[in-house]
């Protein structure tokens, strides 16, 4: 006597089964990973550079160095925001793809 699970399955998989099995994922661009990885470095060095010029009268070009520190910090903030925007766009695109493919629960 054979069990039902041992029988050969000749039926074709439905569209939903195929969609679940081969669900494409929207990949995060490599530039977003680079932006998110580099931004803490710029944030740290910009903050340190700015804070090192605390006593303004201590040496001559302290104001210029403070501006350089703020610019470096601003670049770090820009990189962080750009990376977060790319992650958000990827998430929205993945949700739309899932909705179109009927996987939304």
Image (tube, rainbow, N blue to C red):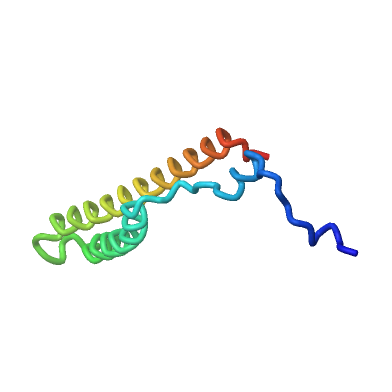
In depth, the one of 5 and 91 nearer the eye is 5
- What residue occupies the far right of the structure in this picture? 1
**What residue appears at the point 78 percent right and 57 percent down from the top-left corner?**
7
7 horizontally vs 77: left or right: right
- What residue occupies the far front of the structure in this picture? 1
86 horizontally vs 78: left or right: right
Q: Position of residue 39 (x, y in %)?
A: 32, 57
The image shows residue 59, relative to residue 91, as above or below, that is: below
**What residue appears at the point 36 percent right and 56 percent down from the top-left corner?**
33
In depth, the one of 30 and 36 nearer the eye is 30
49 horizontally vs 18: left or right: left
| Quarter of the C terminus within the rendering | top right
- What residue occupies the far top of the structure in this picture? 100
Q: Position of residue 92 (x, y in %)?
A: 49, 39
**What residue appears at the point 73 percent right and 52 percent down from the top-left corner?**
9
**What residue appears at the point 84 percent right and 57 percent down from the top-left corner?**
4
User: What number of labels is visible?
Assistant: 0
| Quarter of the N terminus within the rendering | bottom right
Q: Position of residue 30 (x, y in %)?
A: 34, 55
In depth, the one of 36 and 4 nearer the eye is 4
């Amino acid at each position: 006597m054979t069990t039902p699970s041992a029988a050969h399955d000749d039926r074709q998989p439905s569209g939903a089964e195929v969609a679940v099995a081969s669900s494409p994922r929207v990949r995060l661009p490599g530039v977003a990973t680079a932006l998110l990885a580099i931004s803490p470095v710029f944030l740290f060095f910009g903050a340190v550079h700015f804070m090192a010029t605390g006593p303004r009268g201590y040496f001559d070009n302290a104001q210029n160095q403070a501006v350089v520190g703020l610019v470096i910090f601003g670049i770090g903030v820009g990189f962080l925001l750009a990376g977060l925007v790319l992650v958000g766009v990827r998430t929205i695109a993945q949700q739309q793809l899932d909705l179109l493919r009927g996987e939304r629960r």
